[in-house]
Image (cartoon, grey):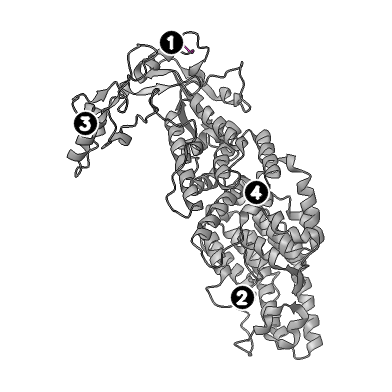
Amino acid sequence: MSKEIQFYPLEIDHHHPKPIEFLGLNALMTIDQHNSFVTFNFKEDTHLNEESKFVSRLKQGYSLNIERNLQILINESDISEGPGLGLMDFWEYIHKCEKYKDEKLLNKEHLLPDPCQGFFNILKPVKEGEFPPKVSQLLNNKIYENKERLSVLKICGWGELEFYKKEGNSNLDHILKELLEKEQHFRAAAIAVFHFSFDKALDILNSIISNKNNKNEKFSNEVHYLRGVLSGFYNIQEIILRDYEITSYFFIYDNLNDLRAEDNGDMDFANADTNDDNTPSYLSEVAKIKNKKQKIDMLKNTLNFLQNLAKKACFKQPYLHLTTSFLSQELFNPKSFLQNNLISFYDRIALLIRFFPPSDILEFMETVSSNLHEGFIEHMVLFGNKFEASLQIISSYLDKTRDIQTVGLASCHLRFLLFPQEAKLNDWFKIYKDLLNRLEVYEIRAALDKEAQDLKKLIVEKEKGFKGVSLSNDDMDISLISQRCFYCFCSLSHSNNIGSSKKGYATLSRVDKSRILNCPDCLKPLPNCAICLLPVSILNPYLDDLQRKKNKNSDENPDLEILNIDEALVWCQSCRHGGHYKHIIEWFREYPECPVSDCQCECSML
């Protein structure tokens, strides 16, 4: 199956190359001599090449809307297979930064730590050896906890350990619910296991089995196997938590002091009786043993047995494989998962933060800091507003992938959120807009300009506390359209002149033409068209005002009656020469250079 998208021909200026070029797009182009359109033909493929990705994302609306971008990346390939996770984590990070600013403005309680400062800055005390973590033990796992680590875990979308809480409205329940709504069932099950909530993980695995899904069906054997192993871990945990005499042997955790068993009788171990022959079936007998030492030995042997079962599992699903590695312990170490790009970067960091000592975190910090050139764009979450490192990461990603589409769009967000004074980000954004111009997708380019301006206004208003502070001229993107009189610098926008007290307004009231050739303030003539040499025109603000009042209670747009696109003013944003829209379009169908004599600008290339 093939899809088709049409653009006007792309011209490459080899004399003045841009920093980023998409020469590879030419290989996808075919020119139809009848309508002068260029046709992109490409097949649906899980692993799209860079040109096809560019076109596909553009068609789907890849823009400054982060939620839409995330959905596009999800649709691009099977999320369970992993491709694109790093890019999704990067957009998710920008979304977290914007969400933090929103919540801070509203003075919300339980505000998450500021993700803008980056994980490494939050973990700075780790590097300096301050505030050593408290070490706990759950089953055979060491847990490292302190304020800084918990902050990073919360930004990663994890929560505090609360596996002993049986109510259905805990923080972990909200985390898992959000993942399930995104259909990330395998990830949700794994995170439940990493919180030692084996019962919640079993519920998720059971839902995967009961809900037949073609995407998950190929992993059904893995799900059944893991469910059997987890049933054993869950029942062992319940036995230990219900027997106060042995709890402290397997669990060294402060919050367990508040634990109170609701049932001191024999437990129902139905969950352990699955169809999997590897599942221990004697756990109910272990619960009945009265001798403390004998009971502990039996539980230890059972744990070893379950860990060996997990060790033997060779799963293909990334999160299921990560879960069995964690349960087996012997295969679970930072080197086994930190470089695994089939796992969300947030989960990889969270595993490191929760289960490993400061020495492993320091080693990871040093490794990443010395390898910024590798171009893993998701690593920006580690550095945040530390611009030099973040810039290096983005630059390396751009060199590696040529994905100016993502970098340009993200730069607009980052310039407003984190780095308002950095011109490099604005340069990347402009390069992407220039590319859209050269592809002649002007509607997309115009919509992008509108989105960018709306985004900046919104963020500035948030920073000002929603006091409605308007942007100054210095805040405006110079590439946006702005019409002003050459003589008095008065705005030529008719909407700005309605009901005006300008001195020329009284004169305009005696003119019955829908379009005028003079400035509404100083009445001096407007510029001449570079081709026909006649003055350009603008809407008469006086008549427009009357028309608006007349149609005040009407749904009709009064501008439609008097607006003629052929008479609209257009100009080159490089040399600033222009004229009537109709004349400029006709000129550039024949000639690439500016119509003004002695001007060497090749406007049609821009």
Amino acid type at mark 4: Asn
Name the disc covering residue 385, or none.
Answer: 4
Secondary structure category for the residue under label 4:
loop
Q: Looking at the image, which is closer to me, 591 or 6?
A: 591
| Callout 1 crowding tier (Cα within 10 Å): few <14, some 14–19, many ≥20 | few
Q: Mark 3 points at which residue?
A: 543
- Tell me the kind of residue under disc 3: Leu
User: Between marks 4 and 3, how big is the CA–CA gap?
Assistant: 51 Å
- Per the image, label 3 sits on a secondary structure element best described as helix
Q: What separation in Å lies between label 2 and label 1 (alpha carbons)?
A: 78 Å
Dots 4, 1 in contact, CB < 8 A: no
Question: Bounds of the magenta span?
Answer: 589-593
The correct choice, above or below, for 198 with respect to 105 in the image is below
Q: Spatial distance from mark 2 to mark 3, Cα to Cα?
A: 79 Å
Q: Between residue 291 and residue 338, name the one nearer to us.
A: 338
- Depth check, mark 2 against mark 3: the one in front is 3
Q: What is the number of the mark on residue 590?
A: 1
Mark found first going from the N terminus, 2 or 1: 2
Q: Which residue is the site of mark 2?
A: 271
At 26% across and 31% down in the image, what residue appears? 541
Mark 2 residue type = Asn
Name the kind of residue labelled 1 in the image: Glu
Examine the image and state in which quarter residue 425 appears. Answer: top right
Sequence-first tag of 1 and 3 = 3
| Residue 417 among those drawn in magenta | no
Can you say whether 525 is above or below 269 in the image? above
Residue 359: x and y in percent read: 82, 60
